[in-house]
Amino acid sequence: MKIHTTTRGLELTNEISSYAEKRLSQVDKLIGEADLPHTSCDLFLVKETSHHQQGEIFSAEMILKMGKTTVFSKASESSILASIDVAKDELVRSLKHQKKRRFVLVRKGALKVKEILKGLRF
């Protein structure tokens, strides 16, 4: 999977980029080997502090593109690493939901075909 990282308001260090790559490698397991070469992930890391009264707020947005399918997740936390974790967890949850939904639709279609075939008389 190709990972494109963009930052705004902060500097991208080796620690942050390696942490993000390590977390997104867990997403690779859910995608599958066939879709992996055609998959890209856009990671946007933003430091949002100008309109808050206290503390620093970091947000992470992940856009996963797999062919025609696009999955989006966003998280805002008090540290950049925590926001990457939360966004990754949301992305994994969305991928699992889509995978489960696709499986349910295939089973429903198979049941319809079975009902049609049972109704035919030879």
Image (cartoon, helix red, strand yellow):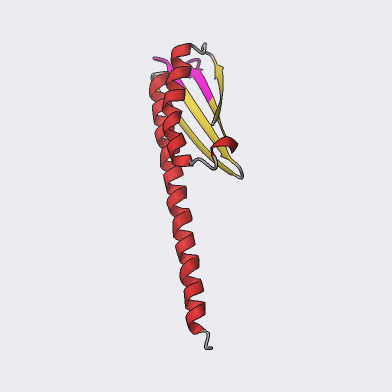
Residue 74 placed where, x, y %? 47, 32
Q: Which residue is drawn at 48% across and 26% down?
A: 60
Q: Which residue is drawn at 51% across and 21% down?
A: 45
Residue 69, image x and y in percent? 57, 44
Query: Taking 33 as reference, is 51 above or below it?
Result: above
Residue placed most toward the observer, 47 or 35: 35
Q: Does the magenta stretch include residue 120?
A: no
Measuring from the top left, give residue 108's x and y in whole percent.
46, 66
Q: Is residue 39 left or right of residue 75?
A: right
Q: Quadrant of the N terminus?
A: top right
The residue under the point 47% across, 48% down is 98
Residue 55 occupies quadrant: top left
Image position, residue 48 (x, y; %): 49, 19
Q: Give the range drawn in magenta.
A: 44-58
Can you name the residue that lies furthest to the bottom here? 122
Residue at horizontal 48 percent and vertical 61 percent from the top: 106
Is 55 a magenta residue? yes
Residue closer to the observer: 29 or 54: 29
Q: Can residue 52 be seen in this view?
A: no
